[in-house]
Amino acid sequence: MTQATATRPTSLKATDITIEVVYRGIFQKTLAQRITRGVVLAARQRGLPGTAFSRYGDSPERNGVPAKQFAVVAVNDIELEASMARYEPAIVDVTVAVDDTLVKGVESWAWYGRQPIWKPVRANGVVLVTSDKSPDEILAQTDKTDRPYTLGVIPGEASFAGLWVYKDDHTDWRVLGALSKVLPDWLPLDEVKAQVRTQTKDENAVASVQYGHDATTFRPVKAGEGTDAHEKLAFTKPGWTTMRTGVIVDARKPGERNPQFKRYATRTQRPVVNFDTCIKCTMCWLDCPDECFEVTGSGHFEVVYEACVGCGICAQVCPVKDCIVMVDELKFDSNKTVFPEWEKDRNTYNAWFEKTSGRSAAPPKGEKAAVAVGGDE
Amino acid sequence: MAVAVKTKETSEVQTEQLMTGCEAIAEAIRLADVDVMAAFPIRPYDTVMQAAAKLIANGKLDCEYIVADGEHSQFEIVKHACAVGSRVFVGSSGVGWFYAFEAIAVTAGLRLPVVAICGNRALDDPGAFGTEHNDSLAVRDLGWLLPWAETAQECLDLALMAWRVGEDARVSLPVAIGLDGGFLTHSQQLVSVPTRAATDAFLPKFDLGDRLLHPDNPITIAPQVDQDWLMEIRRQNDAAMRRAIDVITEAHADFKKLFGRGGDSPFLDEYMTDDADVVFFGQGTLALPMKVAIRRLRAEGHKVGLVRLKWFRPFPTDEVVKSLSRFKAVGVVDRDYSFGSPHYGGVLYNEVRSALYSREQRPTIVGFVAGLGGREIDQSMAREIYEKTAAAATGGLSAGDQCHWIGVRE
């Protein structure tokens, strides 16, 4: 490789910088790619070499599955080589979560377990989240940390703009603006703006960079801050002398669910059920692609939240209005099944249902009472 | 197709019969009580599927016999049958073998002890039926055990060895026996056929243990593992291949005790090597014309012998080094090619050189590519091979003149 032409800016203390973008499969793949590309291109503006790549073991085409992309910028080509020919950096300076529900943990389709969002972030690094919530609300759902970092919230909802059929919404430029705020030595605001201006010839895009830089709110997080509510889910990878012969892993026995690979980190919304209006039609149970519903003794169908990926099909097929409602995942801090609460005290449960879902728990008015199909009452 | 005819009782445990190499393999299938076979015709492998089908038709063998829609399915069928605990047999030749290549690769990766023959055949186009070893050798790096047979007798014996060694829990790897197309697959020879009872004493029932794919034993085979597991999986295959050396040695000793055959070494067959200065080294049926040449050369006073390799994988490095370092020069005769390889030598040539590299006392090694496409290796060719090797032994061959094509028209 040839040496980069630029000399190392004196302000740069490190030899390289690594930025991770955690995103949801397919919906945000292109968005993540644009952000990491934007970092490399902005750094190139001042002569620094960089590389952008995705975690190769991910399944970025699968709906909602957490996945990662990276950008590495270095002071010269030699330093950059340390980050090339690599699937996943072990330590990053900044993690960007482009969907705030990802702070509940990242479980990719591999042998990673559920990882805290800050897991690869170095001490005193930065976690940036795009969200319409406050840093305190985000922190309340983030795993308790063992090292200090800075949490920044970039205003905005989880963006689908990377998906072909959605209009661009400048999430990528706002994230680049926020990155220029936290990495001013590596990505000076003026140079990021100059690069975006060259690339887009659109002053609105440049304004979005400025907005991301100015509007991102920060909160220092001390070691020990965060929640203990989320399940620990980690693997110990076997060695060649301890693993089974013949590429074999234990399969599930009938009725048993996978204790190690759960996939609920794929969820951005979860189904909440009004058991009072349920007509036991079986549609949710039948159509759920992940067999998440268990039949209760009373013939209701309760959601096993450890297995649910939040696809929303149950809510779509349910024939009763507001009987199954999809609710923002950040409103929950437990995967415990809620049916026993309804059995114990319907009034309390229904009050909780109304507060959580924002819908009425009363039977739909002015409509014919639904008829149970094959009911046992 | 000839029908095996009993010629004489040789002992209580076996009878002599006249049959082709492929029919000898079919006899082994019967004796091993194979559960599932998958077949798809290609010459020269196909005579074994005909012979085995006839055994089933005549009530001599109770076996699920599945004719596939091509070699890929054929090898997939036995791989899956093996995973549910069936003793299996399969085989192919030349480009048919290559059409099955994906299934062949994963069979070894999953440690499923499928037993196959590769009726060695030139990789056509252009159309060619005759023997070349490149089809078998293409899988040499994948975890298949690769023995080569010299005679119809050895076809039968190696097949029984193959199930015993491959299915041994210490190994659990597939085995592909190399049979030279035509010379071995289609020529009838006298073969001692063991009785079923004697075979049972040698070959235990196949037992996959807790690896059995069965509703009572829920397992997942071959999940997505990526870089997190794959290196450990490869290392397990490596360890299994290393253990195979001892398991073959054990099986060979038991076989010899029961049936009185197999020679001194499980891996090498030495012929007139005691006082030899020069030896030929090769595998398969080429040993036959070379032995004739050796007898004639010895009559003229030349100290020449033959070392025939019986197992190419696992490569018996220690035995090969111990044997070949006794001689002044070794002429490695390859019935294969490896275009662009070191010194433009054959596969076996470079394996032998690699095995001997770290030895201080090592013979001069000369490589010969001969008999491709089944071209007969005649006595004049054997003599040319000897003369070039003997010249190398006395320093009469330059370093740039290490590999030769024999019996090729200029």
Image (tube, coloured by chain):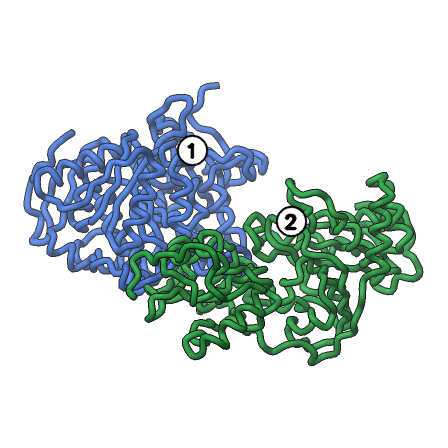
Label 2 Cα crowd, 10 Å radius (few <14 / some 14-19 / many 20+)? many
Q: Is residue B369 above or below residue B326?
A: above
A220 left or right of B334 in image: right
In the structure shown, which secondary structural element does the residue marked by tag 2 occupy? helix
The foreground one among B177 and B267 is: B177
Q: Which chain is the one coloured blue? A: B
The foreground one among A44 and A126 is: A126
Q: Which residue is mark 1?
A: B385
The foreground one among A187 and A317 is: A317
Distance between the Cα atoms at labels 1 and 2?
A: 64 Å
Quarter of the picture holding the C terminus of chain A: bottom left
* Spot occupied by residue A175 in the image (x, y as percentages of width and height): 77, 55
Amino acid type at image mark 1: Ile
Residue ID at (42%, 30%): B384
Residue projecting furthest to the right = A10
Can residue A337 be seen in the rendering of this structure? yes
The foreground one among A253 and B102 is: A253
A84 left or right of B248 in image: right
Residue ID at (89%, 56%): A188
Residue projecting furthest to the top = B410
Chain identity of mark 1: B
The colour assigned to chain A within the rendered structure: green
Amino acid type at image mark 2: Lys
Residue ID at (78%, 72%): A219
Query: Which of the 4 image quadrants contains residue A122?
Result: bottom right
* Spot occupied by residue A18 in the image (x, y as percentages of width and height): 75, 59
* Spot occupied by residue B286 in the image (x, y as percentages of width and height): 33, 36
In this view, the mark in front (1 or 2):
2
Q: Which residue is mark 2?
A: A29
Label 1 Cα crowd, 10 Å radius (few <14 / some 14-19 / many 20+)? many
